[in-house]
Image (cartoon, rainbow, N blue to C red):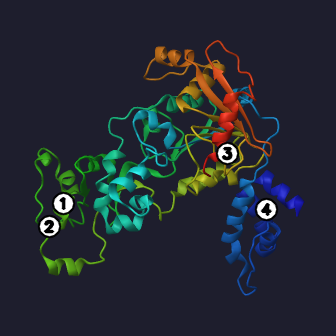
Amino acid sequence: MELIKSEARSLGMIEFLQEYVVRRGISVRSLLEGFGAPLILDSSIHDLQLLPLLKRQLVYFYRDRPKLEHINTIDDVVDLIKNSKRILVLTGAGVSVSCGIPDFRSPQGIYTRLNEEFGLDDPQQMFDIDYFRETPEMFYSFAKELYPYNFKPAPSHAFVKLLEEKGKLLRNYTQNIDTLEHVQGIQNVLNCHGSFATATCIKCGFKCDGKELEAAIMNKQIAYCPQCKDQPKEVTSPPTLQGMGSETAMLLGGSINDASHNDDDDDDDDDYGAIKGIMKPDITFFGEKLPDQFDEALLLDREQVDLLLVMGSSLKVAPVSDIMSHLPHTVPQIVINKTPILHFKFDVQLLGDADDIVAYLAKRCGWELQHEQGSESIQKMLESKLRLAVYSSDEGDSVLSDELGSDEENEESGGSDNSELLAQDISKASV
């Protein structure tokens, strides 16, 4: 069984299942037992029906990836970036925080606000597809906070674009829905959770450009489908519709409060439980399948990737968080994030402000990071002292803390007071 596990590490999940289940005909039941599934399996269950259980068990197996022993310091990270040719970059909400877009899980993030302002039992309800169908006004009352209106890309986005210009970017998988990767001009990007760029009616499937919803979102109104025409009859179009096209005007329904002012009880009874023609931005909500392009791209990329770079993500939302499970364990894995990720074993985690860290990495690589802030702002960022924790996760977890400036060489400083403090912070971090 150890030989099989060793092959699983080198192949990645998809290729391992293809090789052992499809080509060799090894039973799923025996593989489940070999990978230590804590189950008593009913012999009457067909073998292939157990495949989802095997995939879930393999996810846990791949999370216990052995750290690559030769990758430990920021110097190693710089060498990897300079020498890699097919870098897979996974970006999360943390790269857009400096743009003014809130993240989800920090104390000041979206989920905290949803708890405080809307009193939801579970803040993820706001992005649950069933909840949206029942209570679309809840989402539209908050969508303005997320809509990519007048936001500008950050240096972190510019760094990904720089990798692409250097011919090193295999693909940018982004969990973000703000479309700032497209604004930055990144070509090879995949929006794993969709975006506001387009929208679809949840009833008839009518599609439109996301810009058609902008007026409704900014006015905190429900956007109704221009084909289904299910908006409340007594609602009149607000003055903001003057000069709009008829299709855009049709998208705009009443305000959140207007939606409850229909006194026709018979109509309410007839429509109870019926899905209304409401436009939904093509964001992947909880309960919806990720776009097919995600699986298709990952199948191709896992054969080519030579470095995984995770930026600004806590990796707590599947299936994007399971990307590491599909990559061979020999592929180096690096994290740039505010806080450490403890439920995966990465080779090195660079902890600090992502924009500062990528500016430093670009300089160490001998590249000029072009950004709207201007070269002077980037240079000022580099000249200031950068507090950076280098977290190398293994059985003997170690924390290296450096103060990095424009003229300083990166040196290990384990054992300093600051290292001990960081080590304590890491040990307390929630998984």
- Mark 1 near mark 4, Cβ–Cβ under 8 Å? no
Whole-percent x, y for residue 124 in the image: 44, 59
Alpha carbon of mark 3 to alpha carbon of mark 2: how far? Answer: 53 Å
The Cα atoms of the two marked residues, 4 and 3, are separated by 39 Å
Q: Is residue 418 visible?
A: yes
Q: Secondary structure at mark 1?
A: loop
- What amino acid type should be assigned to the residue bearing mark 2? His
| Residue 316 position in % (x across, y down) | 57, 53
Q: Residues within 10 Å of mark 1 (few under 14, many from 20)?
A: few
- Name which residue type carries label 1: Asn
**Residue at the extreme bottom:** 44
Q: Nearer the viewer, mark 3 or mark 1?
A: 3
Q: Which numbered tag is attached to residue 427?
A: 3
Residue on which disc 4 sits: 19
- For the residue pair 34 and 399, the one nearer the viewer reads as 399
Q: Is residue 31 left or right of residue 241?
A: right
- Callout 3, which amino acid? Ser
At horizontal 34% and vertical 67% (from top left) the residue drawn is 133
Residue at 47%, 17% in the rendered image: 377
Q: Between marks 1 and 4, how big is the CA–CA gap?
A: 57 Å
Q: Which mark is residue 261?
A: 2
